Image (cartoon, rainbow, N blue to C red):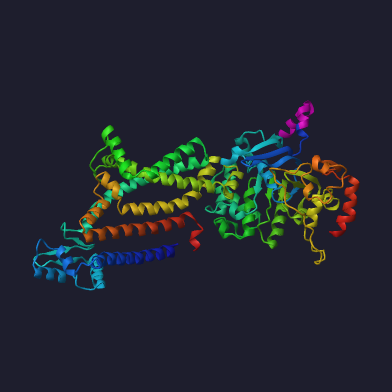
């Protein structure tokens, strides 16, 4: 088990390096493929109508005239040791871990990300709890009485939940929870400051995000349960004289949940990299919003930072899912 | 105490006398039908048999003849789960004086695993992959006994030891996939017997196993039956197994019993062409290898449109022998051959004896 964990962790680190290299290559090659010269890139870091000397200085100091792998090396070095950007008239220091510096907003990327991660994390975690509980519960009940009124009704709602876009359900939630019954707060409050206020403000966002996902999870659980409840070991459990509730939960759900763990981990990992639309609809200043800023401003360091963060969460989620799976399914450990 | 009151009641009440005359397991006119979009599948259609404690009844027949459906019906397993509502069951199943077809689901559940237990064909898929073997046995025990986890575990280890699993205390913590096929079936047997059931149903317990292990498992079932004195229903299509371990044989065809009787009778004086077919298709070590097996020609009958008359007539080489068209129009009822030997066939007893002794037996 320990060697399995070590092996997987090592593989995750390698994977992250590869992802960072590929991301870096894409973001630094693309402008050149689009025909932008190093001079033009350097101009982006300066104010209006810069002098020829300034451009050259910036280009040289930022290493824009160097080959890609050297630039990548500087980037990686920055993550470990921090970086100093010499812009001729001014120098900017970016502390380790330096994931780049936005010259448009004059802020390092990393502190900006760390201040936003808790917001996106709060959004994702709360919604995840809601959608997992409701989705699995609905899925189980539907599977136990397939084609019943309850099953059809909930699967209909689930279909609607999957189909409705967030900018619709989100607005609806705002209308319901903030306008009709204005008992829910508007501005994000950190959990550490006031947990009840934190939950209160986030609740509408949780609900709309959870509706989308719980629909998927209900369908997933339903089909998984329909399949497991036909397994031979369910017949054995019944033959032992177990109460049907125990058969369903201890034997059926236990087996049906394992594949759901996988999907859940991946979904959560993806969400932590930014729930773009939800954050926008609910005016949450999370990672997704930051990514949108970066894209609209054509601010490469921001985009690169968010992409790497998202990749990090997905890789970590993947690792955790595999470890959880090994813990949940004893047959996995052998391989 | 119970003995006394039972005997007392038997003397005073005629109704009770009838009840007491029932065998330990007494199945009467059992029907198990499954309505589907294509029609009603009559998996079991009027089956009756009796079984006493300490005896082994072998149910034989092709796939789809209703063997497994019968055993699941006795266990009350058809009516559970999402499909449970689609089953139509009628008839009577008396187990130790209790009627199970009309009994409430929870009543039957309490008997399941305690008074009647079942061993399934494929122990790998029949055991839960995520729980250790020990835990699964503990669960079976604690469902019917209010004991501590520790005591139940001791009991589970004792049972694993009893079915011949080496180092039972250590193996109790293994998962089913870590066992070999034979060991898994032993564990399955340990799980079925942990509550000392009086009725054990084994549904093709050796089919999924290595030939070398089959004999061991059969011996184990036989030994345990002697030790616990339970009644055993052994479902199989392996007549070699039947000859080995059964006291009585029930031959099923198309959801009905076509012949039943003591095992020696069935092997020495079989009275139904289908039974002859089964015997003819059994490989035997003492037969010349140049001789071919005699298969039963044709396909098993559809259980939705069971052939009219005798369900076996489309495949029966002797269907034209009885006068008139009876084999195609009249369903043969079970008739006593002698003693406990019954057969449902339109052939006259003389014809049957002649065909068996002159045509069939010499070729076997």
Q: Is residue B47 left or right of residue A102?
A: right
Q: What segment carries the magenta color?
A: B1-18
- Please give left or right for residue A254 compared with residue B231 in the image: left
**Residue beneath the point at 80% across and 50% down:** B316
Above or below for B105 versus B258: above
Q: Describe residue A102's horizontal placement relative to residue A54 as left or right.
A: right
Quarter occupied by residue B89: top right
Q: Where B257 sits versus A258, above or below? A: above
Q: Return the x and y of residue A235 as percentages of the image width and height.
A: 59, 46
Q: Is residue B177 visible?
A: yes
Q: Position of residue B120 (x, y in %)?
A: 64, 51
In the displayed structure, A300 sits above or below B303; it is: below
B125 to A88, vertically: above or below: above
Secondary structure mostly taken by the magenta-highlighted segment of the chain: helix
Q: Nearer the viewer, residue B120 or A61?
A: A61
> Foreground: A14 or B20?
A14
- Quadrant position of the N terminus of chain A in the picture: bottom left
Where does residue B171 sit, x and y in percent of width and height? 57, 58
The answer to whether residue B324 is left or right of residue A92 is: right
Residue B318 lies in the magenta stretch: no
- Whether residue A131 is visible here, answered yes or no, is no
Frontmost residue, A4 versus B3? A4
């Amino acid at each position: 088990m320990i060697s399995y964990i070590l092996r997987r962790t090592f593989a995750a680190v390698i994977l992250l390096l590869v992802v960072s290299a590929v991301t870096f290559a894409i973001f630094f090659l693309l402008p050149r493929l689009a025909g932008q010269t190093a001079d033009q890139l350097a101009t982006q870091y300066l104010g209006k109508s810069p002098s020829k000397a300034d451009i050259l200085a910036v280009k040289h100091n930022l290493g824009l005239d160097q080959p890609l792998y050297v630039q990548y090396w500087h980037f990686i070095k920055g993550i470990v040791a921090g970086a100093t950007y010499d812009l001729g008239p001014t120098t900017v220091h970016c502390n380790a871990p330096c994931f780049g510096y936005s010259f448009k907003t004059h802020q390092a990327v990393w502190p900006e990300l760390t201040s936003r991660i808790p917001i996106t994390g709060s959004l994702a975690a709360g919604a995840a709890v809601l959608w997992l509980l409701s989705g699995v519960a609905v899925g189980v009940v539907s599977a136990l009485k397939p084609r019943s009124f309850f099953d059809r009704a909930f699967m209909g709602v689930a279909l609607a939940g999957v189909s409705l876009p967030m900018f619709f359900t989100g607005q609806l939630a705002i209308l319901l929870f903030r306008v009709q019954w204005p008992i829910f707060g508007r501005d994000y409050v950190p959990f550490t400051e006031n947990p009840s206020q934190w939950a209160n403000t986030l609740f509408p966002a949780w609900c709309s995000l959870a509706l989308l996902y719980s629909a998927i999870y209900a369908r997933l659980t339903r089909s998984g349960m329909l399949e497991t409840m036909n397994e031979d070991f369910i017949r054995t459990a019944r033959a032992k004289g177990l109460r049907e509730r125990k058969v369903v939960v201890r034997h059926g759900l236990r087996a049906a949940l394992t594949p759901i763990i996988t999907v859940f981990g991946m979904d959560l990992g993806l969400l932590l990299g930014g729930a773009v639309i939800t954050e926008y609809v609910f005016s949450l200043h999370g990672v997704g919003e930051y990514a949108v800023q970066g894209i609209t401003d054509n601010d490469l360091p921001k985009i690169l930072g968010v992409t790497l963060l998202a990749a990090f969460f997905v890789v970590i989620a993947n690792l955790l899912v595999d470890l959880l799976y090994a813990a949940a399914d004893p047959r996995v450990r052998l391989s | 105490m119970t003995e006394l009151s039972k005997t007392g009641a038997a003397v005073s009440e005629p109704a009770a006398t009838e009840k007491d005359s029932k065998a330990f397991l007494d199945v009467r006119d059992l029907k198990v039908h499954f309505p589907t979009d294509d029609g009603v599948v009559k998996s079991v259609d009027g089956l009756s048999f009796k079984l006493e404690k300490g005896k082994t009844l072998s149910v034989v027949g092709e796939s789809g003849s209703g063997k497994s459906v019968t055993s699941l019906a006795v266990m009350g397993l058809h009516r559970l789960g999402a499909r449970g509502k689609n089953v139509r069951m009628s008839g009577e199943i008396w187990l130790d004086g209790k009627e199970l077809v009309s009994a409430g689901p929870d009543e039957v559940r309490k008997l399941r695993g305690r008074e009647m237990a079942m061993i399934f064909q494929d122990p790998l898929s029949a055991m839960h992959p995520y729980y250790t073997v020990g835990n699964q046995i503990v669960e079976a025990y604690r469902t019917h006994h209010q004991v501590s986890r520790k005591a139940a575990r001791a009991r589970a280890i004792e049972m694993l030891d009893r079915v011949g699993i080496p180092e039972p205390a250590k193996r109790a913590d293994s998962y089913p996939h870590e066992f070999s096929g034979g060991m898994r079936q032993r564990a399955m047997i340990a799980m079925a017997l942990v509550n000392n059931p009086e009725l054990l149903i084994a549904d093709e317990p050796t089919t999924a196993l290595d030939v070398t292990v089959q004999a061991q498992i059969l011996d184990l079932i036989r030994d345990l039956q002697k030790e616990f004195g339970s009644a055993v229903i052994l479902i199989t299509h392996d007549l070699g197994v039947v000859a080995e371990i059964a006291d009585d044989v029930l031959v099923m065809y198309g959801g009905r019993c076509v012949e039943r009787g003591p095992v020696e009778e069935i092997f020495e004086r079989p009275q139904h062409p289908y039974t002859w077919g089964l015997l003819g298709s059994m490989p035997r070590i003492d037969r010349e290898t140049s001789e071919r097996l005699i298969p039963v020609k044709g396909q098993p009958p559809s259980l939705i449109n069971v052939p009219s008359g005798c369900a076996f007539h489309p495949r029966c080489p002797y269907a034209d022998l009885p006068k008139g068209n009876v084999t195609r129009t009249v369903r043969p009822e079970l008739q006593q051959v002698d003693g406990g030997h019954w057969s449902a066939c339109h052939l006259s007893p003389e014809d049957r004896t002649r065909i068996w002794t002159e045509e069939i037996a010499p070729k076997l």
